[in-house]
Image: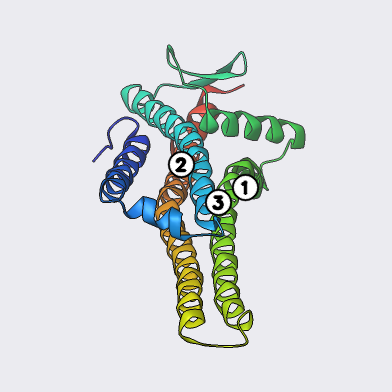
C-alpha cells in the first residue's frame, strides 16, 4: 500500500500536535508554572529550550527527508508508467521515455554511479562501487540524525546536573544551621523541600523532554532506511538495466 504524500511530515505534525495539546493542559492546570517556579536552578527552563531547539531541527530534517521520499515515490511511479522504456542521461538528469525523472537523492546516486563506472571502465566492482557511493551519500543524512540523538543525550545529562544541584542545595540547608531549634527546623525543612523539588523537577523535565524528542528522530531514522532501501531497489532492478539497454 502506497503511503500518502508527505506521510513523514504528517506523522511529525500529528505527534507534535499531541505534545502541544498535553502542554496546553499542563499550563491550564498550573503545573507548568509550578514546575518553573519551584526549580530555583532554572535547569528545567534550559531543558525546555533544548527541547524546542531539537524540535525545530527535527522539523527541518523531516521536511527535507519527506521531500526526498516524495521525489523517490514519483520516480517509481514514472518507472511503472513507462514500463520497459529506456532511460537516458540528459543534462545531468535522467529521462525515462519522454518523461524527466524528478531530481533528488535517487537520481544523484545513479548519476554518480554512472560517472564512477565510466572513470573505472570496468564492471567487476560495480556492486562494491555502488555500495560505497550509497554510503557516501548517506553520511550527511545520518550525521544530522546523530546530532539529534546527541542533543537528547545532552538534555538528559543537563537534567542530571540539575538533580545534583538540587541535592546539594538540600544538604547545604542543613550545614548552614549548626544550632537546630523549632524555628530553624522550619527554615531547614522549607529549604530542603526547595532543593528536593529542584532535583525532582529537573529529572522529570529532562526525562520527559528526552522521551518526547526521541519520537521525531526515531521516525527520521525509519524514513532514512526507507529512502535507502528504495534507492537500492530502484537502482538495481529498474534504472541500471534500462540504462544498459539504452546503450551509450
Q: Secondary structure at mark 1?
A: helix
Does 86 appear above or below 16? Answer: above
Q: Which residue is located at x 53 percent, y 59 percent?
A: 40
Q: Which residue is located at x 33 percent, y 28 percent?
A: 80
Neighbor class of circle 1 (other Cα within 10 Å; few <14, some 14-19, many 20+) is few
Tell me: 141 left or right of 82: right
User: Which disc is residue 52 wearing?
Assistant: none
Q: Earlier in the sequence, mark 1 or mark 2?
A: 1
In the rendered image, residue 155, in percent from the top left (x then y), is placed at: 55, 58
User: Which disc is residue 46 wearing?
Assistant: 3
In the rendered image, residue 182, in percent from the top left (x then y), is placed at: 45, 85
Quarter of the figure with residue 136:
top right
Q: Which quadrant holds the N terminus? A: top left
184 or 18, which is in the foreground? 184
Q: Which residue is located at x 36 percent, y 41 percent?
A: 12
Q: Closer to the observer: label 1 or label 2?
A: 1
Q: Which quadrant holds the C terminus? A: top right
Does 26 appear above or below 160? Answer: above
119 or 151, which is in the foreground? 151
236 or 43, which is in the foreground? 43
The residues tagged by marks 3 and 2 sit, at their Cα atoms, a distance apart of 34 Å
The image's colouring method is rainbow
Tell me: 189 left or right of 114: left
Q: Which residue is located at x 68 percent, y 48 percent?
A: 125
Q: Earlier in the sequence, mark 3 or mark 2?
A: 3
Q: Earlier in the sequence, mark 1 or mark 3?
A: 3
User: Which disc is residue 143 wearing?
Assistant: 1
Residue placed under numbered mark 2 in the picture: 227
In the rendered image, residue 176, in percent from the top left (x then y), is placed at: 63, 79
Q: Secondary structure at mark 3?
A: helix
54 or 69, which is in the foreground? 54
Image marks 1 and 3: residues in contact by CB distance under 8 Å: no
Amino acid at each position: 500500500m502506497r503511503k500518502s504524500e508527505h506521510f513523514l511530515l504528517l506523522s511529525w505534525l500529528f505527534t507534535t500536535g499531541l505534545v502541544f495539546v498535553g502542554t496546553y493542559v499542563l499550563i491550564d492546570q498550573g503545573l507548568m508554572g509550578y514546575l518553573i517556579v519551584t526549580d530555583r536552578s532554572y535547569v528545567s527552563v534550559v531543558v525546555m529550550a533544548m527541547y524546542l531547539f531539537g524540535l525545530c531541527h527535527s522539523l527541518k530534517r523531516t521536511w527535507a527527508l519527506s521531500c526526498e521520499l516524495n521525489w523517490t515515490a514519483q520516480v517509481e511511479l514514472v518507472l511503472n508508467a513507462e514500463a520497459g522504456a529506456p532511460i537516458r542521461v540528459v543534462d545531468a538528469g535522467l529521462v525515462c521515455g519522454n518523461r524527466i525523472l524528478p531530481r533528488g537523492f535517487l537520481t544523484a546516486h545513479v548519476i554518480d554511479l554512472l560517472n564512477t563506472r565510466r572513470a573505472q571502465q570496468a564492471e567487476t566492482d560495480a556492486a562494491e562501487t555502488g555500495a560505497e557511493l550509497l554510503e557516501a551519500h548517506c553520511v550527511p543524512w545520518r550525521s544530522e540524525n546523530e546530532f539529534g540523538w546527541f542533543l537528547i543525550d545532552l538534555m538528559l545529562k543537563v537534567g542530571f546536573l540539575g538533580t545534583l544541584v538540587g541535592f546539594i542545595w538540600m544538604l547545604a540547608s542543613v550545614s548552614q544551621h549548626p544550632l537546630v531549634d523549632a524555628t530553624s527546623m522550619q527554615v531547614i525543612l522549607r529549604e530542603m523541600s526547595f532543593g528536593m523539588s529542584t532535583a525532582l523537577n529537573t529529572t522529570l523535565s529532562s526525562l520527559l523532554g528526552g522521551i518526547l524528542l526521541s519520537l521525531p528522530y526515531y521516525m527520521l531514522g525509519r524514513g532514512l532506511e526507507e529512502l535507502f532501501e528504495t534507492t537500492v531497489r530502484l537502482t538495481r532492478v529498474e534504472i541500471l538495466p534500462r540504462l544498459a539497454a539504452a546503450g551509450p
